[in-house]
Structures are given as structure tokens and as C-alpha cells.
């Protein structure tokens, strides 16, 4: 009698299985958008063949900031103080620019207490994938309005928000981030393609993911509920990503698809859904964000990209080797170098 041999295990280009990219069991509420984002990060890292040990997961405080515990358990991690993840991430990347930094924040963590740190992170173009898990409220502290809550949005108690929101994408574009996108935790295909493209970009990726809080902000009258976001999601294009290690040409209809080559040679194909959209033009991106916000809609997709902009480590001429491995003779200038500096100051 012959016995059937077990099906070969599914592995990626570095021989790892999807399970190798998982994290601990989530303690977030069932149905929380943040869980879906963690799942897409796992998928993206598996499909791109990322070495988890090269990844540093950074976060602040909030339900969103707990998420790094639920993906890539073999990576390095640092759970910083509320809103202070950007400075810790900056230090980490300057100490070792070969790391892949994934920062997870919330709309409260970034838009309120952390706004000052966020502003300087964006203008420095640090190499980091900075994800805002945006539910328009402070989930961890029971659902108060955050700075991304829309004007007129209602709390469960009926309280109406009377302050205008901060559009984190518009802010990031204005400040200098070189890859700015918006997506929805419920849109698996778009979010996965954007995350894979983010892993291929060198510079600041600011990804604002609408991620409903099922416990405090998923009712009628909320503009960050699943139902509202689903009905008002306006993708500007279909996003298709082809990694550098899969040399597949994509058939393009002339004029309708924009091709962007990313830092590692991967390509992103953006097929217009409606009007022609050029994500390399800042003014177009700002206009789109303002027009869609005025209609109460969310423009999603790759809103702005500048693939060749120098990142912060390149700008500062940071050495290739991690600082911790540099020998003493390279970290301490000798007498001759000090004499030269003193001479130049005379
Ligand atoms: C210095 C400081 N101030 C306030 C708090 C209380 N606090 C904890 S989480 C949070 C907001 C979290 O909101 P958000 O970043 O949107 O994350 P979410 O829970 O919605 O994912 C606040 C105000 C704190 N932990 N530390
Ligand atoms: S309170 Fe809201 S944000 Fe926090 S885990 Fe539950 S659903 Fe998610
Ligand atoms: Mg929040």
C-alpha cells in the first residue's frame, strides 16, 4: 500500500513559512481594525521575504501601539512613551541604518500628544514605515474624540465633535514625507499592496489606515465606523505591486496606468479608477485631499511618492556599519584630527 506524501510546506524566497512571521495572540477586541492591519503586515513581510531579525518594531501608547506584539515575534521591539516613538526610532536608525523600522502609532498618539515629534519625523524623511491606525478616537482610554475625528462626528453618548480634523496625510505631504498613502483596514488587497511597496521604499512612509474601533466608534453618526468608511472610501487607483525578485511585466493600457519604480527596483502600478491622478505631484495630492474631505469622503491609495528623495541617514552621511560595531579608532578622532580642527578655528 502506498501512503500519500504530505504536501510540501509553503515557503517564501528565504525559505520561511507564514507562521514564522506571526506574533503573540492578540488581546485587542475581536473585530478591531488594528488586528486586520497586523495580519496584513505579516502577509507583506512573508511575501517580500523580509528577515524578521533585521526589523525593529516601534510604538507609543494606545491599543494601536500594543499591536507590534501581535506580529513578527522574532524582530526587535521598543514600546516607547505616549507620542514619543519618532525620537526613539530616529535614534535606532541612526545607530544602525540597515534595520527596517516599522512604527505603529494611533491617531491620538500621533495627532495629539505626539504631534511635535511627528512633524520633525516627517520633515527628516527618516527611513521608517510609520503607520497610523486611525480610528478617530482614543480607544485605550474609552473612546474620547482624537484630533482626526471629523467635524460633526458623534460619540456613542450623542456628543458631537465641534473641532475640525487634522488630515495626517496632508500634513505629512506638506512636511516632506516621501511616500504618503491612505488605506482602510477592511481593504485587504489595497493595504497589502501598499505595505509591500512601503517595504521597497527608502525614506519616510506615512501610511494612515482607517481602522474602526468596534467598541467605542462603530455606531451610526460616527465617520470612522466600518459602514461609513466602506461607503465613503474613494480609491484613486487600483494598486498593483511587483517585487524586484519577480520579473513580471504588467500589461498597461496607455495613459491609464502610472508606473513608479521604487528604491529596491520593485514596481508599483497605479491604474486610474476615475480621473487621471499623478501621485508624484504634491499640489495634485493636496487638492485631492481637500476636495474629498469637503465631500466627507476618504481618498485612498498612494497619494504622494517621491522615490528618489534622500533619506535622513544619507543626508547625514551616516556610516554603513552599525555604530555599536565600530572599533574605537574609528569613533575617537586621533590627536592629528583634533589638531586639524583646532587649527581651522584659529
Ligand atoms: C503621557 C500620557 N498621557 C496620557 C495617557 C493616556 N492614554 C493612553 S492611550 C491614549 C490615547 C490612545 O489613542 P490612540 O493613539 O488613538 O490609540 P488607540 O487606542 O485608539 O488605538 C491616552 C490619552 C498616557 N498613557 N500617557
Ligand atoms: S477599544 Fe477599540 S481600538 Fe481598542 S482594541 Fe477595542 S476595538 Fe480596538
Ligand atoms: Mg485611536
Image (tube, rainbow, N blue to C red):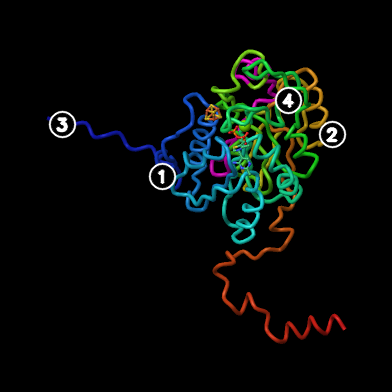
User: Is 72 colored magenta in this rendering?
Assistant: no
Badge 2 density bin: few <14, some 14–19, many ≥20, Cα 10 Å = some
Mark 1 against mark 2, which lies toward the viewer?
2
Residue 167 placement (x, y as % from top left)? 75, 31
Residue 283: numbered disc: 2
N-term-proximal mark, 2 vs 4:
4
What is the number of the mark on residue 256?
Answer: 4
Residue at the disc numbered 1: 16
User: In the rendered structure, which disc, 1 or 2, sits on the residue that comes first in sequence?
Assistant: 1
Residue 281's label in the rendered image is none
Badge 4 element = loop
Say what secondary structure mark 3 lies in: loop
> At 48% from the left edge and 42% from the top edge, which residue is drawn?
69
Q: Judging from the image, what secondary structure is the residue with disc 2 in?
A: helix
Distance from the alpha carbon under mark 3 to that under mark 4: 54 Å
Q: Secondary structure at mark 1?
A: loop
Q: Give the image location of residue 334, x and y in percent.
A: 68, 84
The label nearer to you, 3 versus 2, is 2
The quadrant of the image that shows the C terminus is bottom right
| Span shown in magenta | 225-250
Q: From the viewer's perspective, is residue 18 above or below residue 272?
A: below
N-terminal-most mark, 1 or 3:
3
* Badge 3 or badge 2: first in the primary sequence: 3
Q: Is mark 2 within 8 Å of ligand 3?
A: no
**Residue lying at 76% horizontally and 86% vertically, measured from the top left:** 339
Q: CA distance from mark 3 to mark 2?
A: 67 Å
Amino acid at each position: 500500500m502506498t501512503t500519500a506524501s504530505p504536501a510540501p510546506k509553503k515557503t517564501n524566497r528565504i525559505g520561511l513559512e507564514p507562521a514564522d512571521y506571526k506574533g503573540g495572540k492578540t488581546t485587542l477586541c475581536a473585530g478591531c481594525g488594528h488586528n486586520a492591519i497586523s495580519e496584513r503586515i505579516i502577509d507583506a513581510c512573508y511575501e517580500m521575504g523580509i528577515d524578521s531579525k533585521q526589523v525593529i518594531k516601534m510604538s507609543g501608547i494606545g491599543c494601536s501601539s500594543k499591536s507590534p506584539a501581535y506580529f513578527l515575534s522574532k524582530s526587535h521591539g521598543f514600546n516607547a512613551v505616549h507620542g514619543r516613538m519618532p525620537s526613539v526610532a530616529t535614534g535606532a536608525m541612526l545607530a544602525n541604518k540597515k534595520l527596517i523600522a516599522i512604527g505603529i502609532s494611533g491617531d491620538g498618539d500621533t495627532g495629539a500628544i505626539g504631534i511635535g515629534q511627528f512633524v520633525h519625523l516627517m520633515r527628516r524623511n527618516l527611513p521608517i514605515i510609520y503607520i497610523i491606525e486611525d480610528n478617530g478616537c482614543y480607544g485605550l482610554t474609552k473612546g474620547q474624540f482624537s484630533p482626526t475625528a471629523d467635524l460633526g462626528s458623534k460619540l456613542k453618548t450623542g456628543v458631537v465633535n465641534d473641532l475640525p480634523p487634522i488630515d495626517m496625510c496632508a500634513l505629512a505631504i506638506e512636511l516632506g514625507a516621501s511616500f504618503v498613502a491612505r488605506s482602510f483596514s477592511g481593504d485587504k488587497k489595497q493595504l497589502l499592496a501598499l505595505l509591500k511597496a512601503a517595504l521597497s521604499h527608502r525614506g519616510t512612509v506615512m501610511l494612515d489606515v482607517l481602522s474602526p474601533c468596534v467598541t467605542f466608534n462603530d455606531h451610526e453618526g460616527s465617520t470612522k465606523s466600518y459602514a461609513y468608511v466602506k461607503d465613503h472610501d474613494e480609491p484613486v487607483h487600483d494598486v498593483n505591486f511587483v517585487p524586484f525578485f519577480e520579473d513580471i511585466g504588467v500589461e498597461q493600457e496607455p495613459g491609464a496606468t502610472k508606473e513608479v519604480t521604487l528604491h529596491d527596483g520593485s514596481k508599483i502600478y497605479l491604474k486610474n479608477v476615475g480621473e487621471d491622478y499623478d501621485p508624484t505631484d504634491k499640489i495634485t495630492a493636496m487638492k485631492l485631499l481637500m476636495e474629498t474631505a469637503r465631500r466627507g469622503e476618504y481618498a485612498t491609495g498612494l497619494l504622494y511618492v517621491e522615490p528618489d528623495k534622500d533619506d535622513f541617514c544619507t543626508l547625514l552621511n551616516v556610516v554603513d556599519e552599525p555604530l555599536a560595531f565600530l572599533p574605537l579608532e574609528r569613533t575617537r578622532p586621533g590627536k592629528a584630527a583634533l589638531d586639524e580642527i583646532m587649527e581651522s578655528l584659529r
